[in-house]
Amino acid sequence: MGPTLAWHRPNKRMRHLTTLGAFGFLVIGGSLLGLLDGDSPFEWLLWWQSWILIIVFTILIGGPFSTIVHSAGADWLQVQRLRWGVTKSNFVKLYELTKIDVSHGGTTFHLYLSDGERAVERSFEELQVDRRVWDLVYNGVLHSVASGATVTTKAAGILELSHVPGLKFRNPYTEGGK
């Protein structure tokens, strides 16, 4: 693999804001449930068991001890996750992709890239945070599509491959393929 040309790592402030948001969500949600039950909205906060649940779920939802780093080179994409001191990483060769798919996960779409040996699935939102990373990924996708990679109908539509001038590929919209 060549040198890293672009990378993105979320800053600490954003991770802390996410953790605080998770804490606030749990406290407000618990208060609303108490209010709907007919009790005082803050009575449940007097129980020590509720604080244990709040702390545990805040850590699980907010992920203050997790970091995901996206890095890309001229022909590769790597996703590295650091959680609880354990680092896991995976990468794909962008110019050798064999399958490109898009799935709907939660509130956003996820891009699935496979080069035959390895696969990476990340949300569009995560890949597009840094424009340079997204440009390298999209260029690799276009090259692989032009070289004959399998593209699903949903992926072709969301990536707007039919609008790329000069790109010759089996258009699933006109041929009814998947």
Image (cartoon, helix red, strand yellow):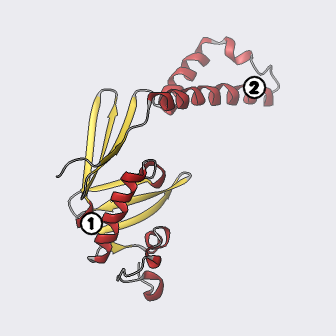
Relative depth, front residue between 133 and 171: 133
Query: Helix, strand, or loop for circle 1?
Result: loop
Kind of residue sitting beneath label 1: Leu
**Label 1 crowding class (10 Å Cα cut-off): few <14, some 14-19, many 20+?**
many
Q: Earlier in the sequence, mark 1 or mark 2?
A: 2
Q: Is residue 31 above or below residue 87?
A: above
**Residue farthest toward the right in the current orientation of the protein:** 38
Q: Is residue 48 left or right of residue 176?
A: right
Q: Is residue 89 above or below residue 42?
A: below
Q: Which residue is pictured at 29% across the width and 71% down the height? A: 143
* Dot label at residue 41: none
Residue position for label 2: 34
* Percent coordinates x, y for residue 69 in the rendering: 35, 40
Query: Which three-letter amino acid code belongs to the residue tagged 2?
Result: Gly
Name the outermost residue toward the bottom. 175
Residue shown at the point (49%, 28%) measured from the top left? 13
Q: Which residue is mark 1?
A: 97
Identity of the residue drawn at 41% across and 59% down:
111
Q: Measure how far apart labels 1 and 2 are at the Cα level.
A: 52 Å
Residue 162 at x, y = what percent? Answer: 45, 79
The quarter of the picture where the C terminus appears is bottom left
**Residue 157, percent from left and from top:** 49, 72
> In the rendered view, does 24 fall on the left or right side of 155?
right
Could you say whether the residue bearing mark 2 is in a helix, strand or loop? Answer: helix
Instruction: Say whether marks 1 and 2 touch (CB < 8 Å).
Output: no
